[in-house]
Image (tube, grey):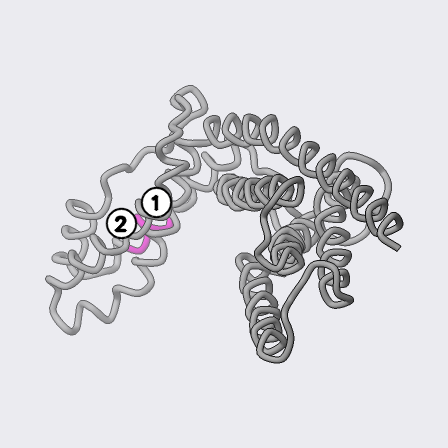
């Protein structure tokens, strides 16, 4: 799965489950104890268990060494959305006791996963999923600056001036020593990129129709350079945030599966005693 495709696949699956759940509710009352409730709970729990284990095993051990790490992460994210959704449907919106605690922890883990994915995608990576080092970002930035300068050399003077003055705030690569750990750049990257694209559109809107024909190529180069500049400036902060997120996410996940185990055992015990 490519960037964001796992999210689309997950939301389509969630929508399909929701439609099926609503359709079923029109003919019968959902309950955790009926066959469909058990099925949702079992499959959802298995998906959540796989979410918490398989990706870590693939990443940290020599087991399961097939497929790209990025593909494993995509599957990890997909299961991390669909699994909790199925568990929520299993509860039939009854949140009392241990089941309520389990559901609350499920929601916390799912939300934490979204935040972790956001931080993860702020760290530049190769196609295989390996993190790119800061020196590589500096080289990319130098190459992009060179491409932009070559592009400007053969374009109309007005366009050259506009690009230099209005849309090229930085012309020198960010070096490793300049990295200060800009956490704001990590957390606000979507807003920052959107603002930059809007500024480009406003700047290029001043050009004549003929000059606008050249805009697409330079716009792509500028946006790519802006992204690399941001990644270089926030390189250290992104890794620090990722490390702190893992330190918080793992204990919450452990608490969740402790709660799930107790819930399953209690359900089996009470089910046996009730016969």
Mark 1: secondary structure: helix
Assign the N terminus to one quadrant of the image: bottom right
Task: Tell me where the magenta segment starts and ends, as one range.
Answer: 146-151
Q: Is residue 146 visible?
A: no
Task: Give the image location of residue 88, x and y in percent.
Answer: 61, 55
Q: Is residue 268 visible?
A: yes
Instruction: Please rate how many residues cluster around mark 2, counting C-alpha atoms within 10 Å: few if below 14, some from 14 to 19, many from 20.
Output: some
Q: Is residue 253 above or below residue 88?
A: above
10 Å crowding of disc 1: few (<14), some (14-19), many (20+) = many
Residue name at image x 79 percent, y 48 percent: 267
- The residue positioned 70% from the left and 58% from the top of the image is 32
- The tag on residue 196 is 2
- The residue closer to the viewer here, 215 or 256, is 256
Between residue 13 and residue 155, name the one nearer to us: 13
Callout 1 touching callout 2 (CB < 8 Å)? yes
Q: CA distance from mark 1 to mark 2?
A: 8 Å
Q: Position of residue 198 (x, y in %)?
A: 23, 56
The residue tagged 1 is 226
Q: Would you say 260 lies left or right of 234 here?
A: right
- Secondary structure mostly seen in magenta is helix
Which secondary structure lies at badge 2? helix
Residue 23 screen position, x and y as percent:
59, 78
Query: In the rendered view of the protein, which quadrant contains the C terminus?
Result: bottom right
């Amino acid at each position: 799965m490519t960037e964001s495709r796992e999210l689309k696949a997950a939301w389509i699956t969630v929508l399909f489950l929701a439609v099926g759940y609503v359709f079923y509710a029109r003919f019968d009352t959902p309950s955790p104890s009926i066959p469909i409730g058990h099925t949702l709970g079992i499959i959802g729990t298995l998906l959540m268990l796989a979410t918490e284990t398989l990706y870590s095993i693939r990443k940290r051990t020599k087991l399961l060494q097939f497929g790209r790490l990025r593909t494993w992460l995509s599957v990890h994210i997909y299961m991390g959305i669909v699994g909790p959704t199925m568990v929520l449907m299993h509860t039939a919106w009854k949140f009392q006791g241990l089941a309520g605690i389990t559901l609350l922890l499920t929601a916390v883990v799912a939300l934490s996963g979204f935040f972790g994915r956001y931080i993860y995608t702020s760290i530049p990576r190769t196609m295989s999923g390996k993190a790119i080092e800061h020196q590589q970002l500096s080289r990319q930035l130098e190459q992009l600056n060179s491409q932009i300068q070559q592009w400007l050399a053969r374009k109309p003077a007005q366009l050259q001036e506009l690009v230099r003055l209005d849309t090229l705030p930085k012309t020198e690569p960010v070096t490793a020593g300049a990295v200060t750990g800009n956490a704001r750049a990590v957390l606000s990257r979507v807003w920052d990129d959107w603002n930059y694209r809007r500024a480009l559109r406003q700047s290029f809107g001043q050009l004549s129709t003929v000059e606008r024909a050249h805009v697409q190529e330079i716009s792509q180069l500028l946006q790519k350079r802006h992204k690399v500049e941001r990644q270089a400036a926030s390189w250290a902060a992104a890794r620090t945030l990722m490390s702190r997120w893992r330190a918080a996410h793992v204990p919450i996940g452990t608490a969740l599966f402790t709660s799930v185990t107790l819930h399953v055992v209690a359900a089996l015990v009470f089910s046996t005693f009730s016969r």
